[in-house]
Image (cartoon, coloured by chain):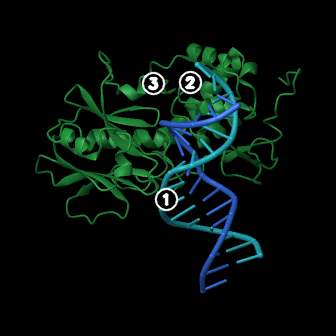
Chain colours: A green, B cyan, C blue
Amino acid sequence: MPELPEVEVVRIGLERWVTGRTVADAEVLHPRAVRRHLAGAADFTDRLAGALIGPARRRGKYLWLPLNGTTALLGHLGMSGQLLIQPHAAPDETHLRVRIRFDDELGTELRFVDQRTFGGLSLHDVVPGSPLALPVPLAHIAPDPLEDVFDEEAFHTALRRRRTTIKRALLDQSLISGVGNIYADEALWRSRLHYERPTATMTRPRTAELVTHIREVMSDALAAGGTSFDSLYVNVNGESGYFDRSLDAYGREDEPCRRCGTGIRRRPWMNRSSYFCPRCQRPPVPGRDPR
DNA sequence: CGGGGCTCCTGTGCGC
DNA sequence: TGCGCACAGGAGCCCC
């Protein structure tokens, strides 16, 4: 399941293999893959033809390629999406959804492959005057914590304004983008915060520490080349990502906490799971601050 | 309007 | 062996 570090690896691959090329034609093999392109698959392929691809961008888990300066090809990998650079002769993948060919002699094409079809591609106008060539749908998504423009004070203020719990807030892309279930659990474990801690109890120092841990867990994964234990994840060149056993909480039910040895617990939560150490990550007692 | 829950989608793995 | 179900989960959408 690609999260921010994995998506960044894909962005770097796109930058290397696709930026500067001109689209010859595109082919949509599954309409669901372009469902966020509201004008439909035919309009999607029509508008892509002839487009010059600009520098690959990313915010959180969204990727985009600026086209001719005024529009952008936006992509989200969802659960199982892959962007592959393949020779024309490579057999179609079972879950090939979109194929983009280029007007050059390099012999390769860009393929969007997605088993579960939670991801997709779409074309959008660019926010006027945006130096990032930000596609319009991303205008109201918060910067991710690895961006220069990420504003920790604004994040803290937004966190305190929300009446919810900390993990919900971390997964809300309008407050902070790029944090998924895995890195949320990892950053909360590093910060010794329970996933159901009310955001109202977040002090500035706690927010600062949490943001630091989010950055660290993402940077560690990025340094490892983009990590994933999901065999579905393949980077833009088709190489499998690898997972280097650096997770402390996620997926470690009943295994000892690396800080205190207590068994890591798994709790069903929002149709998924939360992993935490019941000793290091105590839920706050109402009316009493455990720190 | 904000919080929270539901749904989409397919393949894998496990228990009966 | 085969069936049914839990699980993986980002984010759009809907309802109160």
Quarter of the image that includes the C terminus of chain A: top right
Q: Residue at x 44, y 20 (%)?
A: A148
Q: Are marks 3 and 2 in contact (CB under 8 Å)?
A: no
The location of residue A40, given as percent across then percent down, is 30, 43
**Circle 2 crowding by C-alpha within 10 Å: few under 14, some 14–19, many from 20:** many
Residue type (three-letter) at the residue carrying disc 1 = Ser
What is the x, y in percent for residue A130? 32, 18
Looking at marks 3 and 1 on the same chain, the residue that comes earlier in the sequence is marked by 3
- Along the polypeptide, which appears first: circle 3 or circle 2? 3
Three-letter code for the amino acid on which mark 3 is drawn: Glu
- C-alpha gap between disc 3 and disc 1: 28 Å
Q: Which residue is mark 1?
A: A231
Q: Quarter-wise, where is residue A36 in the image?
A: top left
For mark 3, give the secondary structure.
loop
Chain of the residue on which disc 2 is drawn: A
Query: Mark 2 is on which residue type?
Result: Leu
As drawn, B12 above or below A39: below
